[in-house]
Image (cartoon, grey):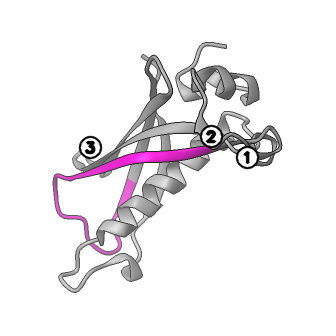
Amino acid sequence: MPEPFRVTIDIRTDDLDINGHVRGPAYLAYADHARWECVWAAGVDPLALKAGNLGPVNLETTIRFRRELRARARIDVLTRFTWEPGKVSRVVQEFVTPDGAVVAEVESLSGLLDLEQRRLVPDPGRYWRKYAVRPEILGLTP
């Protein structure tokens, strides 16, 4: 299995709740940011996807909180795509501190929407592979 794609994020005070913990929506924003960085690193141009009448969609997202995450911390978000038969893929992301502790996991079930038909396309990996310069970053064989 290939190494996950890694993005480092510094926790900001405006991402905190009243208890001084990172808010749930901030975890989702970090996950989205890391996913897009991974897609861009693979060489996928989001405008080319749109020009091809394709758009990525999240169908389900789960956050698992493992440890407290507070202001001024630094984490790495490790992103790994897995491809399943049919119309969906999974993105599993671990939020890891510099000492290796997993503070949270975000798992998303995703698809690729045909923007004209408004339906998920079958075998989305085939399309991602077409648009990626480095599909291995997305867990796809070249």
Mark 2: few/some/many CA within 10 Å (<14, 14-19, 20+): many
Nearer-N-terminus badge (1/2): 2
Q: Nearer the viewer, mark 1 or mark 2?
A: 1
Image coordinates of residue 129 in percent, x first then y, are: 68, 22
Q: Which residue is mark 2?
A: 39
Which residue reaches farthest front? 117
Q: Quadrant of the C terminus?
A: top right
Task: Name the kind of residue labelled 1 in the image.
Answer: Pro
- Name the residue carrying label 1: 46
| Residue 59 screen position, x and y as percent | 43, 45
Q: CA distance from mark 2 to mark 3?
A: 24 Å
Relative to the observer, which residue lies in front, 102 or 61? 61
Q: Which residues are magenta?
A: 56-75
Based on the picture, tell me whether residue 57 belongs to the magenta stretch: yes
SS of the residue under disc 2: helix
Q: Residue furthest top?
A: 141
